[in-house]
Amino acid sequence: MNRRFADCHMHTVLCGHAEHSIEEMVAALEASTLVGGVITEHLPLPDEVDSDRVVSMYPGELPSYVGALQILRERSVLGADLVIGAEADWLDTDPAWTADSVAAARGAGVEVVLGSVHMLDGWAFDDPERVQVWDTKDVEEVWEQYFSVWCAAASSGLFDVMSHPDLPKKFGHRPRDPRPYYEQAAKVAGEAGLLCEVSTAGLRRPCAELYPAPAFIAELVRRGVDFTLASDAHSKAEIGHRFADAAAALLAAGVTRQAFPKGDGFIDWLKLE
Ligand SMILES: [Zn+2]
Ligand SMILES: [Zn+2]
């Protein structure tokens, strides 16, 4: 089998809102046509943010999460192409908490850390349960706030890859002209030497578009940023979802390789065609 692409963003039941176990996700990845991927469970959040444990793993689960992946990797045909990752929330209200959380994750054996902004001042703006809060907000102001927070996250030095960079468009809330935000973010990502993901999750949401949007991808390319591919799978059926479309968007922007960050700190470059 001629395997291609790596899925660098996948979840398991540990986060409380995905469908399949670590073992089931790894088995599905092995059975797929992908080269490999990064399992990226949501790191624990403070109790006051996720008291019901519906968006993140329990604090005590980190060692067993990493241990399970280490054991699976020893047995897996994927070998080093199964990478132990995690998705970290940048808490704009408490960046020091985020720094401690990422340090704990790396200390426990997490090899690749995604940086995500899902919350602005305590509001999980991408949560379908809290979408009505958008009605009380000015869309321009939310985008402005989001990108200023995103840039702080991107320049924190904590993360390897930035997830779903234009997430505020998820439910279709868009500013009149997003280009200044793209320029601001791309400049910071380029200077920080960060990878950004091209996420097909946006194709499954009301916005019906890749994260980041094609014009945003173009701006990131102009700043020398490289890209991973990400499904943000919350079930095994979503692994590698519509990666041909993500690859086509990158090729259209002149990008001919995907980044696959590995456990040893190096990046494999997979050819896109
Ligand atoms: Zn996310
Ligand atoms: Zn995710």
Image: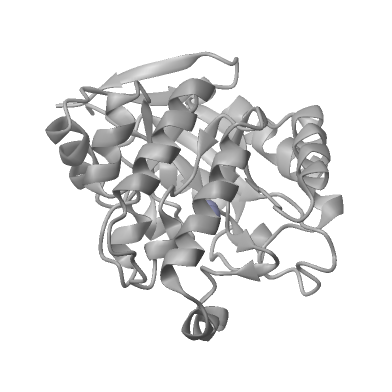
| Vertical order, 25 against 143 (above or below) | above
Residue 89, placed above or below residue 143? above
Quarter of the picture containing the C terminus is top left
- x and y percentages locating residue 170 in the rendered image: 39, 66
Which residue appears at 54% of the width and 73% of the height?
A: 127
Q: As drawn, is 41 to the left or to the right of 253?
A: right
Q: Is residue 170 visible?
A: yes
Residue 9 place in picture, x, y as percent: 48, 44
- Name the image quarter holding residue 214: top left
Colouring of the image: one colour
Q: Residue at x 47, y 85 (%)?
A: 135
The N terminus sits in image quarter? top left
- The vertical placement of 6 against 13, above or below, is above
Residue 28 falls left or right of residue 250:
right
Q: How many marks?
A: 0
Answer with left or right where residue 71 lies relative to residue 27. right
| Residue 96, image quadrant | top right
Of residues 272 and 255, which is closer to you in this image? 255
Q: In this view of the protein, can residue 114 be seen by the observer? A: no
Q: Nearer the viewer, residue 34 or 164?
A: 164
40, 129: nearer the viewer: 129
Residue 63 in picture, x, y percent from top left = 81, 41
